[in-house]
Amino acid sequence: MIFLLTIKQKHFLSVLCFLFYSSLSFGQIRNGELQSWNDVILKYDYSEKLSVVGDAGARYYFDTHWSVFYVRPALQWRLTNSFSITGGVAFFYNLNPDYDNVNDLRIFQMAELVWPRIAGFKFHHRFMVEERWFVTKIEPTQYKVRGRYRFGVETPYYSLGGGNKSIYNIVFIEFLGDLDTNDLSPFNKYQRYTLVAGHDITDRVGMELHYQLHSILLDSGMDIQQNIVRIRLKLNLNAS
């Protein structure tokens, strides 16, 4: 934490690149899976406090030829400039040529806090609970409750070449785990490490490039590493 705050801003991107290649090499050594995620985030401010938000996209797993299509609308209420709560639903359709297709239905609740803000850096906290129903044609419907906590550090905006300061970077680590089990430490089996390079093209349009490394420990003891490249389009439909 202290290390991040003391890095000169102009060197922060170099540190991200180093972490990116280190993580990628580690994933390749572990024979990790490769995935491509592409999505769009939409936001419409209904008032100063209330917004309609959501995302939709497609994911492809190169190793298993598994495709996922999803939509996730939600309502967000901003209590302050630093704290908001969100609730919504989601539908994930999993298509696999070798297995029965899976409908993943979700209801989720989320609280987000940006604190503290130090020297232009923002510290993000996200707490999320998902109720999930897995529906197939063959197997009985499965119900699970998953908890998620994500921590991130976002840089101040900067420019390359002296233009407008519209570029930023974020480092995230997220812990995920099933809450409806007898596991005393559910969050030690699934972690997501994410590096983000973002650019706000205008007040309404932005783009992000993500690299994610997912580390998953299965109940069988198998350790899975997933390498994910994500392209994200951000649209704020009524930004001033």
Image: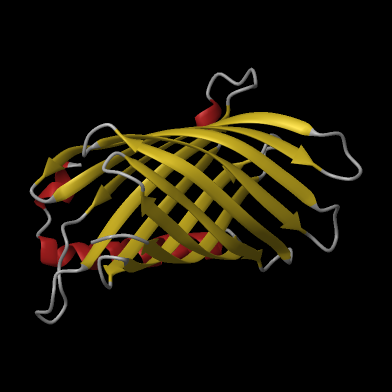
Nearer to the camera, 223 or 209: 209
67 lies left or right of 14: right
Seen at 59% across and 35% down, the residue is: 107
Q: Is residue 206 above or below residue 145?
A: below
User: Given the current orientation, which residue lies at the most extreme right position?
Assistant: 138
Can you say which quadrant of the picture contains the N terminus?
top left
Seen at 92% across and 43% down, the residue is: 138
- Colour pattern of the rendering: secondary structure
User: Given the current orientation, which residue lies at the most extreme bottom position?
Assistant: 161
Percent position of residue 63, x then y: 69, 66
165 lies left or right of 44: left
User: Quadrant location of residue 56?
Assistant: bottom right
Percent position of residue 76, x then y: 39, 40
11 lies left or right of 231: left
Nearer to the camera, 240 or 132: 240
Can you say which quadrant of the picture contains the C terminus?
bottom left
Nearer to the camera, 93 or 215: 93
User: Quadrant location of residue 96?
Assistant: bottom right
User: Quadrant location of residue 143?
Assistant: top right
Seen at 42% across and 60% down, the residue is: 23
Q: Is residue 173 above or below residue 127?
A: below
Badge count: 0
Seen at 29% across and 39% down, the residue is: 49
Percent position of residue 16, x then y: 29, 62
Q: Is residue 187 above or below residue 201?
A: above
User: Given the current orientation, which residue lies at the most extreme front position?
Assistant: 47
Percent position of residue 227, x then y: 53, 61
